[in-house]
Amino acid sequence: MPDSESVERTDTRELKEIIKEFLNHLDFAYNYRLQKLVYYGEIWCLQTYGRRLTDATFKAHHYGSFSDDIADALEEMRNDEEVEYETVVKPDGPTYEYSHHEDGGELSPGKKEIIEHIHNETNTMSTEDLAKFSKQTWLYQNTDEAESMDFEYYRDEVVIPQSERERVAERDGCRAESDADLREALAK
């Protein structure tokens, strides 16, 4: 069984690959937009597949959803020169403009397709619109400021409520073993 440190590295590695894949679809992006894109992806994946895109922890903040995991991954990639970046001075202080334009990577074809789909849905949205989206989600609105969002609760009680799981099980005399089984049973 892997130790927690190797699991953490693996999770960080995949998060970095997801960030790079988002950047591959953009000329550049700031941390703020990347935060909102990954969060959009989390909500979309939960609503579509009943699973998350990443395992990043998100918190509710004044400017919308925020993940220290994403900010840390960006800093590591910047320090390790895994992404290109430029320092940009803004009225509220310096920030970084990130870019990455290399095909490949270690991300599964399925996650690449998901990110492409999310890009196609969001490429005409401003960053402020993405922030508004994040603030309008049930998950954000039901999380206290600076507290971690409970994606599992959101999935189980809002996206696919337990009552639906029980209704399908009762109707079909069986228990849905996965979200795919549940969706198939609900389609009957």
Image (spheres, grey):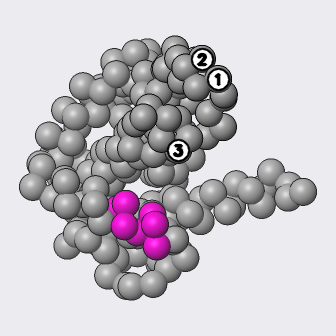
Name the outermost residue toward the bottom. 103
Three-letter amino acid code at the position of disc 1 = Gly
Residue under label 3: 180
Residue closest to the eye, 1 or 88: 1
> Where does residue 68 sit, x and y in percent of width and height?
49, 43
- Check disc 3 and report its element: helix, strand or loop: helix
Compute the Cα span from label 2 to label 1: 5 Å
Q: What's drawn in magenta, residue-wise?
A: 109-115
> Where does residue 46 sit, x and y in percent of width and height?
44, 40
Q: Quadrant of the C terminus?
A: top left
Mark 3 vs mark 2: give the one in front: 2
**Left or right, residue 23 beside residue 77:** left
Residue under label 2: 170
Mark 3 vs mark 1: give the one in front: 1
Q: Is residue 73 visible?
A: yes
Q: What is the chief secondary structure element of the magenta stretch? A: helix
Residue located at (26% from left, 51% from top): 33
